[in-house]
Amino acid sequence: MPDVHAFLSASASHRWLSCTPSAAIEAKLPDKTSQYAEEGTRAHALAEKRLNRFLEGKPLKRKPKDVDGEMWEATEVYVDACIEKINDARKTSPDAEVHVEEQLDFSPWVPKGFGTGDMVIVSDDFIEVIDLKYGKGVKVSAENNTQMMLYALGLYNTYGMLYGAEKVRMTIVQPRIDNISTAEMSTEDLLAWGESIKPVAEKAFKGEGERCAGEHCRFCKAKATCRKLADYELEKVQEDLEPEELTDIDIVYILMRSDSIKKWLTTLEEYALDKAINDGITWPGMKVVEGRSNRKINDTDLARKALTDAGYSMDEIMKPQELQTITALEKIIGKKRFTELMGDNLIKPQGKPTLVPESDKRPPMELENVTDKDFDDDLL
Ligand code: SF4
């Protein structure tokens, strides 16, 4: 579950470890909940219930009607991964302890730091924290993941010394994108890392230090108005430009950053519009207007009657029934079951050519056979 109450939360640690004043800056700004956060909370509650049933030796229930297929399937993948881990641990350590929704106190390293481990295992050989991530936007790795390392410190704080485990494991389960990532460290290395971040955490707790922009700004509540981030996003665009023509290097610089710049511009637009609408702010040289809209029929029953009364047949005026989108069908049925039901009928047409950084994991496209044909990469 998100550790919403800690000033220096584990989930934001990537940010406050890189930009030490960010936690204090964010604390002054209002919280905004999103549909994704609410969905994540529901998924965690369901996963907790299902895992507890298993631990209490009760049979796992059938899907209730009010839970969508995708959430049911995703929590099943998570619970199955947890069960596998519990069984593995008990093979070598029959008394291994398992706790669900365990409060983890990492305050010896981070002032007032605490969080919640979705599931933890304490065995003779290792201690492990498992985190369910319901989001599917970004694939998250457990390697060098500061959130997981802080949870692991919290777990060590409660059980590590007692059990003398020499290894810590950290696992992230992201069932909606088939990602199960596990990292392992020696307890010694984890504790050394904990010591190394202590002065940084102290600084972050006091709100001291210089702002530092980077990839970690993505979820910062201050990102719309942060000058450091604006300078960071625009820096490469202004730098290295020839007076008259862009060089190849300039073009690459700009394209490599286009995704990040577009997201930042969207944040800025949303912020300015929100302020104009809700706080009556007038931005010099700008105004709020009605966006473009399409004509629509207000009452479809009346429209149908008018058209049939005028002699048009139902076949002429009505659309044939069409299937829901794949995303909507997967949400109702669950991705796994939907894929089974579709079999070979589920195809992936060739996507249209797209320029991406070399680090992208997709292989380069064979360009010889590329023509002006229609590409479609929106079907999935
Ligand atoms: S947006 Fe600004 S305050 Fe927030 S993390 Fe980035 S640099 Fe720091």
Image (cartoon, rainbow, N blue to C red):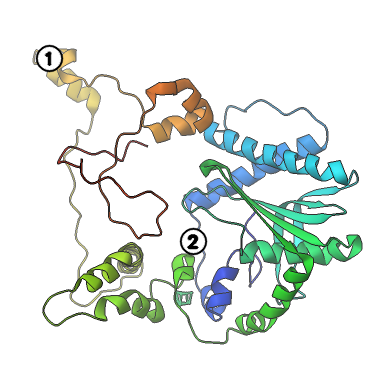
What amino acid type is highlighted by mark number 2?
A: Lys
Looking at the image, which is closer to me, 195 or 364?
364
Which residue lies at the image location 53% right of the left edge and 42% below the top edge?
A: 176
Quarter of the image with the N terminus in it = bottom right
Q: Position of residue 146 (x, y in %)?
A: 62, 66
Q: Which residue is mark 1?
A: 309
Looking at mark 1, is its residue's CB closer than 8 Å to ligand 1? no
Which residue lies at the image location 53% right of the left edge and 52% below the top edge?
A: 37
Please state if 133 lies on the left or on the right of 55 as rendered: left
Is tag 2's residue or tag 1's residue first in the polypeptide sequence?
2
Q: Residues within 10 Å of mark 2 (few under 14, many from 20)?
A: few
Q: Position of residue 5 (x, y in %)?
A: 65, 65
The image quarter containing residue 145 is bottom right
Relative to 350, residue 213 above or below: below
Residue at the bottom extreme of this rendering: 209
Relative to 126, residue 233 above or below: below
As drawn, the label of residue 366 is none
- Secondary structure of the residue carrying numbered label 2: loop
Q: Position of residue 136 (x, y in %)?
A: 49, 48
Which residue lies at the image location 17% right of the left edge and 37% below the top edge?
A: 373
Quarter of the image with the C terminus in it = top left
Q: Residues within 10 Å of mark 1 (few under 14, many from 20)?
A: few
Q: Which residue is mark 2?
A: 32
The image quarter containing residue 117 is bottom right
Looking at the image, which is closer to me, 15 or 63?
15
Looking at the image, which is closer to me, 111 or 79?
79
What amino acid type is highlighted by mark number 1?
A: Asp
Looking at the image, which is closer to me, 98 or 144?
144
- Secondary structure of the residue carrying numbered label 1: helix
Q: Find out whether the residues at labels 2 and 1 contact each other: C-beta distance under 8 Å.
A: no
